[in-house]
Image (spheres, helix red, strand yellow):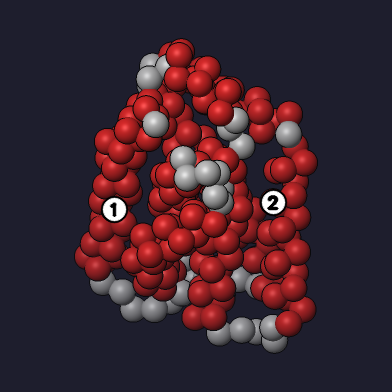
């Protein structure tokens, strides 16, 4: 990682720390959503329902967390970044920052699920690893979608329109993979195969971002 990427990453972190109301707003959204689930669901819910609800919540948390990645950047600020950095450095720093932010939100969500909706997992460590992989996948896709939407008259609705068809295969794979942490019989080879496929899709998204963003950057 070169110095320009680190500088851009530091800039995003400092901006997030200065605008703490946005961060706490997302935390409140996560906590209130899970608390509503706690109030509306029976005490001991089925593990399949628990798993499905968790990933649906993660999807909407990611949309709310990553959507502002490019939409908050003004045209003047983007022109300034255009003059001091390359498009590849800029998009890589955004990808890294959003992955870090989403992983933090994922861990908070998982903790709140354990507190309010019990813990039906038999393999907690495995599920945490799957959550980290899933948070990375979701953030990568929606960061790229945010970059595209930012060039379309700052239309945040495009993030959902473009992102959901792309993220659906990854979401289904994550739900299937996470079943291995619920005492279900899974072959080790199948688990690694699913994890490898998700990782391959992540690499494909990163490659698409690196290839496509310079064209968006020049617009």
Q: Is residue 60 left or right of residue 99?
A: right
The spot of residue 65 in percent (x, y) is 60, 48
| Quarter of the rendering occupied by the C terminus | top left
Q: Nearer the viewer, residue 63 or 195?
A: 63
Q: Secondary structure at mark 2?
A: helix
Q: Is residue 38 toward the left or the right of residue 131 in the image?
A: right
In the image, residue 42 lies at what x, y percent?
Answer: 70, 86
Disc 1 from disc 2: Cα separation? 27 Å
Task: Please state the total of marks drawn on the protein image.
Answer: 2
In this view, 85 is above or below 19: above
In the foreground, 125 or 58: 58
Looking at the image, tell me whether mark 1 or mark 2 is earlier in sequence order.
Answer: 2
**Residue 214's mark?**
none
Q: Position of residue 31 (x, y in %)?
A: 73, 60
Residue 188: x %, y % from top left: 26, 66
Residue 125 in view in this figure: no
The image quarter in which residue 23 lies: top right
Residue at the location (27% across, 36% down)? Answer: 211
Q: Residue at x 52, y 44 (%)?
A: 153
Residue at mark 1: 201
> What residue would you read off at disc 2?
26
Q: Quadrant of the N terminus?
A: top left
Near mark 1 (Cα within 10 A), the count class, few <14, some 14-19 or many ≥20, is some
Q: Determine the residue positioned at 56% across, 28% down.
A: 75
Please give the name of the residue rendered at 66% of the width and 28% of the height, measured from the top-left corner: 15
């Amino acid at each position: 990682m070169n110095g320009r990427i680190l500088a851009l990453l530091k800039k995003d972190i400092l901006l997030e720390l200065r605008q703490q109301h946005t961060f706490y707003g997302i935390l409140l959204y996560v906590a209130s959503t899970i608390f509503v689930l706690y109030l509306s669901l029976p005490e001991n819910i089925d593990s399949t329902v628990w798993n499905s609800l968790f990933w649906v919540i993660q999807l909407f948390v990611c949309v709310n967390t990553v959507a502002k990645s490019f939409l908050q950047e003004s045209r003047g600020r983007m022109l300034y970044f255009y003059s001091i950095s390359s498009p590849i450095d800029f998009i890589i720093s955004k990808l890294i920052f959003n992955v870090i932010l989403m992983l933090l939100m994922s861990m908070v969500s998982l903790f709140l699920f354990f507190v309010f909706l019990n813990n039906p997992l038999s393999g907690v460590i495995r599920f945490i690893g799957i959550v980290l992989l899933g948070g990375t996948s979701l953030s990568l896709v929606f960061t790229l979608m945010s970059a595209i939407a930012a060039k379309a008259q700052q239309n945040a609705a495009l993030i959902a329109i473009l992102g959901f068809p792309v993220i659906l295969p990854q979401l289904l794979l994550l739900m299937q993979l996470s079943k291995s942490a619920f005492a279900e019989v899974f072959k080790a080879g199948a688990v690694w195969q699913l994890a490898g496929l998700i990782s391959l899709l992540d690499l494909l998204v990163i490659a698409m971002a690196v290839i496509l963003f310079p064209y968006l950057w020049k617009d």
